[in-house]
Image (cartoon, rainbow, N blue to C red):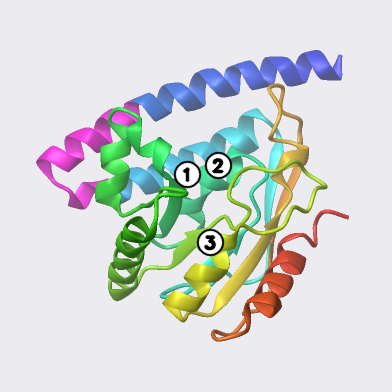
Amino acid sequence: MSTLLAALRSLVFYALFYGGTAVLVLASVIAVVARKAWLRGIVAQWGAWHLWCVETLLGIEVVLDGTLPDGPVLIAVKHESFFEAIDTPRLFTHPAVFAKQELFAIPGWGYSALVYGLIPVARDKGATTLRGMLALAKQRLDEGRPLVIFPEGTRVAHGTQPPLQAGFAGLYKLLKLPVVPIAVNSGATYHHVIKRPGRITYKVGAKIPAGLPRDDVEAQVHAAINVLNG
């Protein structure tokens, strides 16, 4: 019975959340054309709508353990499901997120994401692409925005602790920023076709200073983003 109930709740979630998302993507395209100042509010509304659907329809409680950083800082977040990617614009104040290049090919959404200020990550595209990515990141920092990265590079299964992608340490060194690591355990409940009720926790780690050797910063970030995997 519990599986059937979870399946029904998930179906309602998919219908309402993605239906609302389609409306908001259309609104974002209109905002890009009509008044770009509206875009930030539309993106924030998307995150709020997602949270309402998660908590109300799926029965998943979302808990924050610690104080979120703000302003110019590099935030490294564990990536177990689409949950934290969708929740990012709600969780932080006008974040600039490093997102894989393929996402920007999505009609409507992709261009809106560029205008909002997401930073495309084109893997294995050489030094020219890296320089362009760094230039965008520094521009977002000049605007006073936090940078958010998923240092594992892609979604990973709950309970697994893969090494960080090499690009993370490179960005850390070149941007000369402190890092705030954040663990999240969304994979246990959200990363399934049939989503399960339960709790998703964000655990904010201690700020890691800029300028550490690569091995040191990678070890500290890796340990901090995996504290909820026990």
From the image, tell me which residue sits under label 3: 167
Q: What residue type is labelled 1?
A: Ala
Q: Nearer the viewer, residue 133 or 28?
A: 133
Secondary structure type for disc 3: helix
**Picture residue at 72% right of the left edge, 65% below the top:** 222
Q: Label 3 sits on what residue type? A: Gly
**In the drawing, does residue 8 fall left or right of residue 167?**
right
Q: Earlier in the sequence, mark 1 or mark 3?
A: 1
In the rendering, at what x and y percent does residue 179 appear?
57, 74
Position in image of residue 161 (x %, y %): 78, 53
- SS class of the residue under badge 1? helix
Q: Please state the horizontal and vertical placement of residue 173, each as a whole percent of the image.
A: 50, 77
Question: Which is closer to the viewer, label 1 or label 3?
Answer: 3
Disc number lying in front (2 or 3): 3
Instruction: Identify the mark nearer the N-term, 2 or 3.
Output: 2
Q: Which residue is drawn at 47% across and 74% down?
A: 73
Residue 5 falls in image quadrant:
top right
Q: Distance between the residues labelled 1 and 3?
A: 31 Å
Q: Tell me if I can see residue 74 in this picture.
A: no
Q: Can residue 66 be seen in this view?
A: yes
Predominant SS along the magenta part? helix
Q: What stretch is highlighted in magenta?
A: 23-39
Determine which of the numbered discs, if any, sits on residue 182 in the image.
none
**Residue underneath mark 1:** 48
Type of the residue with mark 2: Leu
Q: What element carries label 2?
A: helix
Q: Quadrant of the N terminus?
A: top right
Q: Name the residue under label 2.
A: 51
Which image quadrant for residue 3?
Answer: top right
